[in-house]
Amino acid sequence: MTDVSDAALQRLAERIGEAARSGHHMLVTAESCTGGWIAKTLTDIPGSSGWFECGLAAYSYEAKQALLSVRPQTLEQFGAVSRETVIEMVSGALANTGATVAVAVTGIAGPGGGTADKPVGTVWLAWKRRGGYPKAEVLHLDGDREAVRRQSVAAALQGLLGLME
């Protein structure tokens, strides 16, 4: 990710808004490590109420289960930061809302919380259209908490744009 400035994020969000409007999409975000930053970036765009359904920030296991229908077995077996969990997050976001397009993110932004298997900067993203199959991707990002989160938001937005264009 080269440019993850506020201006670059805004340009991405504007393009997503245009794609959502022209494709008659409603978006939902399911966020863990980004804490609502993706939703904030999208709703900074005037007129976003026409294409943004809601944003769900779910940090705890309990919230992931209640809001996003992530199965307890998935969390126990694979952990919150995993392909399996992010796929259940993106699918649950669509199942539990009226949205037609979803993005989900879960990761370890740091500075603590990393392990040998999942070091700080490990971030899983997923995107899905209603009726379609989820696409998931893992990133291994460098930098401090702010940098990891900012790069995660940019990647999430780029994936959303790719899904709709």
Image (tube, rainbow, N blue to C red):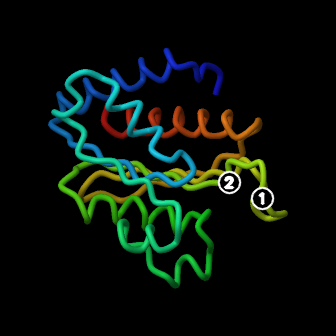
Q: Which residue is mark 1?
A: 114
Q: Nearer the viewer, residue 131 or 108?
A: 108
Q: Nearer the viewer, residue 155 or 134?
A: 155
Quadrant of the frame with the N terminus:
top right
Q: Secondary structure at mark 2?
A: loop
Give me the residue at 29% from left, 51% from top.
Answer: 129
Q: How far from the left and from the top, in percent, is residue 3? A: 61, 19
Q: Secondary structure at mark 1?
A: loop
Residue type at mark 2 is: Ile
Q: Nearer the viewer, residue 96 or 15?
A: 96
Q: Which residue is mark 2?
A: 108
Query: Label 1: few (<14), some or many (≥20) within 10 Å?
Result: some
Q: Is residue 156 left or right of residue 13?
A: right
Outermost residue to the top: 7
Spatial CA span between label 1 and label 2: 6 Å
Q: How far from the left and from the top, in percent, is residue 67? A: 35, 66
Residue 141: name its quadrant: top right
Give me the residue at 43% from left, 53% from top.
Answer: 57
Residue 50, label in figure:
none
Tell me if residue 101 comes above or below residue 3 in the rendering.
below
Q: Is residue 141 left or right of residue 55?
A: right
Q: Nearer the viewer, residue 19 or 41?
A: 41
Q: How many marks?
A: 2
Give me the residue at 37% from left, 73% from top.
Answer: 66
Q: How far from the left and from the top, in percent, is residue 117? A: 79, 65
Residue type at mark 1 is: Gly
Residue 2: name its quadrant: top right
Quadrant of the frame with the C terminus:
top left
Outermost residue to the right: 116
Q: How far from the left and from the top, in percent, is residue 6? A: 52, 19
Give me the residue at 25% from left, 39% from top.
Answer: 52
Tag 1 near tag 2, CB within 8 Å: yes
